[in-house]
Image (spheres, grey):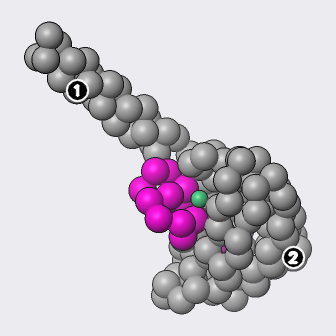
Amino acid sequence: MMKKAIFSKLLLITALVWTLAGCAGKDIVFEAPAGAEEVVVSMKASNFAFDPTVIKAHQGSVLLIEVENVAGIAHNLTIKSPEEKILTSVSLPAGQTVTVQVILEESGTYAYTCDRPMHTTLGMSGRIEVAPHP
Ligand SMILES: [Cu+2]
């Protein structure tokens, strides 16, 4: 009886890890139109993911991220520069939409995460890939 319970628990954990790993491997990409100086991105924060997970843009443009927290709990959006300096960190109350502006002064990869405990590990991360000026 005991052994059976432990076995089914192990199965459940294995299935959960597979599911999380599967989610983490799938990118949802938003690509800014070429030449746009101001780019509006509609983003969704849920338990526990951002949509999109990758934003492609160009150096010198301004991103306006309208992030809607569709979850029933609070989240956060923290964006770091390629040098890992925090550019913005805003709380996202449950069910609300918050607009965040990011000026993409340099090319490189800007990481975004949710700073609530464990949320990044659970899947709340993404990146802005900024291409250099041609
Ligand atoms: Cu979160």
In this picture, is 82 found above or below 3? below
Residue at x 46% of width, y 51% of height: 122
Q: Tell me the CA gap for discs 1 and 2.
A: 51 Å
Label at residue 112? none
Dominant SS of magenta comes to loop
Given the image, on which type of amino acid does mark 2 rest? Glu
For residue 49, above or below residue 119: above
Residue on which the image places disc 1: 10
What's under tag 1, amino acid-wise? Leu
123 is higher (above) or lower (below) than 133 = above
Circles 1 and 2 in contact, beta carbons < 8 Å: no
Mark with earlier residue (1, 2)? 1
Name the residue carrying label 2: 37
What residue is rendered at 65% in x and 69% in y?
Answer: 77
Q: Is mark 2 within 8 Å of ligand 1?
A: no
Can residue 28 be seen?
Answer: yes
- Quadrant into which the N terminus falls: top left
Q: Residue at x 73, y 65 (%)?
A: 92
Quick check: 29 left or right of 99? left
- Is residue 46 shown in magenta? no
Quarter of the C terminus within the rendering: bottom right
Ligand 1, seen in the image, is in the quarter at bottom right
- Classed neighbour count for the residue bearing mark 2: other residues with Cα under 10 Å, few (<14), some (14–19), many (≥20): some
95 relative position to 90: left or right: right
User: Which of 79/48 is in front?
Assistant: 48
Q: Position of residue 3 (x, y in %)?
A: 11, 17
Q: Which residues are magenta?
A: 113-132
Which residue in the rendered view is the most extreme toward the front?
1
